[in-house]
Every structure is written in C-alpha cells, then in structure tokens.
Amino acid sequence: MDVAALLLELYGRIPPLARAAVDGLEPEQLTRQPVPGANTIGWLVWHLARVQDHHVAELLGVEQVWTGQDWARRFGLEPDPSNTGYGHSAEEMAAVRPEGHEALVEYLEAVDARTRAMLAGLGPDDLDDVVDRGWDPPVTRGVRLISVADDSLQHAGQAAYGRGLLGA
C-alpha cells in the first residue's frame, strides 16, 4: 500500500465516526455537558474539525476553510483562525454552539475534502519534510498528519461515548 492510500484510509475513518456521533441530535443535546466541566458532543466534533482545518491549511499554505467561508456564524463564534479549542476554558467550550448536527457534519466534510485532496498527492519523501521547528525534535509532515488523525479519532470516540451517556 502506498503512503497516500494508507493516509486516505486513516483519514477516511474520521467523518463517518463523527457523523454517527451527532446524527439526529438536537442543538440542546449537542451543547449539553454529560457532567459539569466535561466537553460537549458539539465541541468535540467542532474541535476535531478545527484542528484538522488549521493544521492542513498550514501544511498547504492556504486560508482555513473556517475563515474562508461562513462557518463561524453557524457555531455562534467569530472567524478567529487561531481558535481551534486548544486550551479552552469551560466558558469558551460552552460558547461553541452549533446550529445543528448538520453544521458539524458539513464543516467536517468541507475540511475532509481539502485534506483528502492533499493526501492523494503525497509520496513517501513528503512525509519527511520538517513543518514545525518549534518542537524538539522538529515535527515532520508525517508526524503532524498522524497526530491530527490520532486526535480526531480520539475525539470522535469521545463524542460517541457522550452520545451514549445522553441515551441518544
């Protein structure tokens, strides 16, 4: 299996898992905390899409889907390109208010389309390119892509667990 096919398989697992976690949920269910201080289902799926959007746009050197279209309004937020959810306080997490499960799925699908287009063109040598020297050791494209996929899959699983806690 070549690198592009392997990464496309990995990233292709994220949207169906996220979609299953939010499908049919009402806005109130998406923004309900299972217990005080816990992340909401809506925040988890928004965050996984935002991280992927942020990092892939950075890898491509292009504007994020988030800021290039009308997504922020659909989540009750400003189109701040640095707002990915990292380090959010409880208040910031609660401010993420998707207008419905469709907003989450549609945003993730838009991000996924860009990601998959990028992944389809990757070869083995591309994975060794250093993309972030702010870490020791420096982060390569391959490590960044695995990190984003890992984070996304974990959050999709957390959202599915949260859905189960809601009894949905």
Image (cartoon, grey):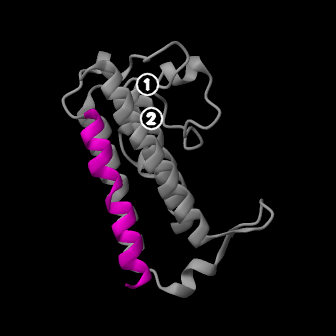
Magenta-colored stretch includes residue 55: no
Q: Is residue 145 above or below residue 6?
A: above
Any part of residue 63 in sight: no
Looking at the figure, which quarter contains the N terminus? bottom left
Q: Nearer the viewer, residue 131 or 70?
A: 131
For residue 40, the mark is 1
Which residue range is magenta in the image? 1-22
Q: Quadrant of residue 104?
A: top left
Q: Residues within 10 Å of mark 1 (few under 14, many from 20)?
A: many
Estimate the x, y position of residue 59 in percent, counting from the top left: 55, 66
Helix, strand or loop at mark 1: loop
Estimate the x, y position of residue 118 in percent, counting from the top left: 41, 71
Residue at 56% across / 23% down in the picture?
Answer: 92
Q: Amino acid at mark 2?
A: Leu
Left or right position of 77 against 106: right
Left or right position of 71 against 152: left
**Tag 2 residue:** 44
Q: Is residue 10 above or below residue 15?
A: below
Q: Is residue 50 above or below residue 125?
A: above
Left or right position of 16 against 158: left
CB atoms of marks 1 and 2 within 8 Å: yes
Q: Quadrant of residue 26?
A: top left
Q: Nearer the viewer, residue 67 or 44?
A: 44
Q: Nearer the viewer, residue 56 or 142?
A: 142
